[in-house]
Amino acid sequence: MSGAWVRGFELNAFFEGERASTMHILTARPGTELETDLSLPNDKATRVLQIEFTGRKPRCDFAPPLHLIIADRIISYSVKAELR
């Protein structure tokens, strides 16, 4: 799987299949979250990453309308934008 991931203070939004851009910071809303063990700095910045990983979707969503994707292994990632 690959897509744009917006990660920041109380913000976790994944856009499957999309290319990361600064516009994702403005359009990030609760919907699909990415669960991963990737360690990002805890400096209150909001980052947009382009990420590729192997992962899975749970068989059922526990708190609709929130959806969760679990990243089992990160293949690559890069920070495309950052807002402090």
Image: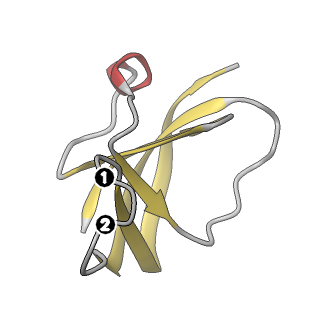
Give the crowd class for mark 1: few <14, some 14-19, many >=20 residues within 10 Å: few
Q: Position of residue 31 (x, y in %)?
A: 32, 42
**Disc 2 crowd, CA 10 A, few/some/many (<14, 14-19, 20+):** few
Answer left or right for 16 relative to 22.
left
- Say which mark, if any, is on residue 64: 1
Q: Please, what is the three-letter code of the amino acid marked with disc 2?
A: Asp
Q: Measuring 44% from the left and 23% from the top, which residue is drawn there?
A: 25
**Image: 4 above or below 1:** above
Residue, far left: 17
Q: Position of residue 83 (x, y in %)?
A: 61, 20
Q: Nearer the viewer, residue 15 or 84?
A: 15
Residue 57 occupies quadrant: bottom left
> Which label sits on residue 28?
none
Residue at 38%, 29% (x, y): give it: 29
Residue at numbered disc 2: 61
Q: Is residue 19 left or right of residue 48?
A: left
Q: Position of residue 6 (x, y in %)?
A: 47, 39
Circles 2 and 1 in contact, beta carbons < 8 Å: yes
Quarter of the image containing the N terminus?
A: bottom left
User: Element type at marker 2?
Assistant: loop
State which quadrant residue 28 falls in. Answer: top left
In the image, taking residue 11 as reference, residue 54 lies left or right, namely left
**Label 1 amino acid?**
Pro
